[in-house]
Amino acid sequence: MNILCFGSLNLDKVYRVHHFVQPGETVSGLSLEEHCGGKGLNQSVAMAKAGGRVWHAGCVGRSDGQPLLQTLENSGVDISLVRRLDHPTGHAIIQVEESGQNCILLYGGANQQITTEQIDETLAQFQAGDLLVLQNEINNLPYLMEAASRKGLTIVLNPSPMDASILALPLEHVSYFLLNEVEARELCGEDRAVEEYPQLLLERFPHSRIVLTLGAKGCIYQDACHRVEQPACKVKAVDTTAAGDTFTGYFLAAVAQDTPIEEALKTATKAAAISVSRHGASPSIPTKAEVEAFSPDSQEN
Ligand code: ADP
């Protein structure tokens, strides 16, 4: 089946600073690095690297969005459904102090300019059974979910970043929830032992499948018929930034190829382990060949 990721495209501008800017103050940045990001972009890149047939839909600025389009294309993602607008590309201004602490100003920009007309035109390219992958970084999600559900698309939701707007979405249409511990707790609205969340979520959304990721502890999958607990691979973690997105991308690409769940979880776990052993977000997402060659006992440096 084909995969449509309708999601965010962000330029991350990372400034190294002696200390964070205080009210009324001007500080000089010591260095600047620009990275392509956004949860939508990261997950599209991961799904395409994993061998999925992936279309990304969303919006970027005409004048500053090219690096994001290039990154998607280089990974094998179809970008014909990304619109170029006279609006700034979504971006994050990230200050990183010498201690490693950061603070982030996020501007949704073009990611918040998705129209219902773009949604209708995009969905017209897909069929019942295709996967629609969503995160919480674009506008008009309720309309998108209702329209996709009417068409019979299989909706996957990664409720990240988690906020109150998630609870107002038509969550009954979601077939797969992929979420971490913090997101699961907020979605359940209850403080429970982490292993209980998949069952609790399933009671609320009985037709869904839950994939709960637990960082270095691995993940739990649960649906109406069975539950699988998959430990993480032991690696030296240096940067966990895109772990969840890598896991999500590899898991969903496998699901789209009708891979059995146990195998899909194992592959996603290996891919995520490689990504945490490397620096960066989308550049840390491994290729399929790297994942196949990875042995869980090996340590990447
Ligand atoms: P998120 O980044 O969305 O919070 P998690 O931290 O739960 O997601 O990580 C997603 C997956 O990445 C985990 O289920 C696990 O497979 C892998 N992972 C995360 N951290 C580590 C780690 N320190 N060592 C090995 N694998 C990890």
Image (spheres, rainbow, N blue to C red):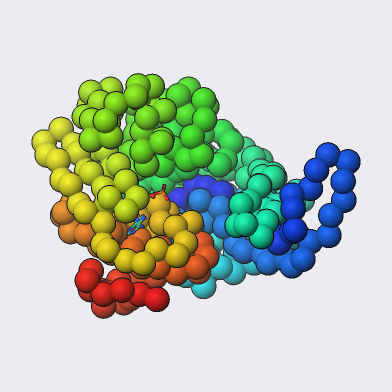
Q: Residue at x 25, y 26 (%)?
A: 200
Q: Nearer the viewer, residue 85 or 37?
A: 37
The quadrant in which the C terminus is found is: bottom left
Q: Nearer the viewer, residue 211 or 218?
A: 218
Farthest residue toward the left? 225
Q: Residue at x 31, y 74 (%)?
A: 299
Q: How many marks?
A: 0
- Specify whether 109 is left or right of 132: right
The quadrant in which the N terminus is found is: bottom left
Res 144 visible: no
| Image position, residue 248 (x, y; %) | 36, 52
- Specify whether 217 is left or right of 185: left
Q: Nearer the viewer, residue 77 or 98?
A: 98
Q: Is residue 22 above or below residue 189?
A: below
Q: Residue at x 51, y 39 (%)?
A: 161
| Image position, residue 245 (x, y; %) | 42, 54
Q: Residue at x 27, y 38 (%)?
A: 210
- Specify whether 225 is left or right of 122: left
